[in-house]
Image: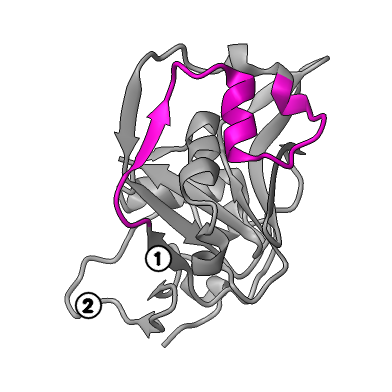
Amino acid sequence: MFGTLKAVANSLLVGGLARLGSGRTPMASGAEMPRLPTGTTLDDLLPGPRQTECFRLHVVEGEIQVDYDLPWEEAIHLGAPNAGFTKIRRVGDQYSKRNGVSLAKITFVNFPGEVTPEFVRGFGQERQLGSTLDPRVIFAIGQYRPGLKSDLSPSTDTMQIVSLETFEIGGGEKYLPCLRWFGRCRSVYGLPLGAKLGPDCWFGFAK
């Protein structure tokens, strides 16, 4: 039932739903099919023809506590203790000045092929998954869910959670904040905007 992206581009965002670890689950009979903006197809959003047949969703159990009062460097250290010198350490002032502690309900999505930030944002908006993740949220995920890789990607050596909230360095070059697992090690870094976002990337949305 899952065709190629090209075959379904004019009718739905992706051809199926699978909750990680439970196998593919077909769309319920009679459910409203997701719609793209008028005149837009998946070929407009993806970097090229792909044989992507499905996506995976994972809802994190419970809520993640995000402490916006923590100094930026301390938040990085708690969430990614193996992080070395990285551009992201210098950009805390580019993000929201929220105060206090909040709780976030996180949903992750993953795609088997390459995608763009625009595609992922549109996917989340169509399904009302919530807002894209502030970097402080991905730091908190590393802090409070250090074993998350075992749930999301147990068979691979590496996995990364990508925030779509960019930061800039120097002459305006933009980067995506990423929390990366390598085995049991966790680090953060900035992925250049425009770099490939492949199957090792999970994208989070918060409510």
Q: Where's the N terminus, which quadrant? A: bottom left
Q: Which of marks 1 and 2 is in front?
A: 2
Q: Is residue 62 above or below residue 113?
A: above
Q: In this view, does 173 lie above or below 20?
A: above
The residue positioned 32% from the left and 57% from the top of the image is: 61
Q: Quadrant of residue 51?
A: bottom right
Q: Label 1: few (<14), some or many (≥20) within 10 Å?
A: some
The residue most toward the left is 30
Which element is circle 1 on? loop
Q: Name the residue under label 1.
A: 12
Q: In this view, does 168 lie to the left or right of 147?
A: right
Q: Which of marks 1 and 2 is nearer the N terminus?
A: 1
Q: In this view, does 19 lie above or below 185?
A: below
The residue positioned 32% from the left and 81% from the top of the image is: 26
Q: In which quarter of the image is residue 171?
A: top right
How many numbered callouts?
2
The kind of residue on which mark 2 rests is Ala
The kind of residue on which mark 1 rests is Leu
Q: Which colour scheme is used?
A: one colour
Which element is circle 2 on? loop
Q: Please provide percent x and percent y for residue 144.
A: 46, 45
Between 81 and 68, the one lying in front of the other is: 81
Please report the bounds of the magenta region as a residue range.
Answer: 60-89
Q: Is residue 77 magenta?
A: yes
Q: Is residue 129 left or right of residue 142?
A: left
Q: Is residue 39 above or below residue 86?
A: below
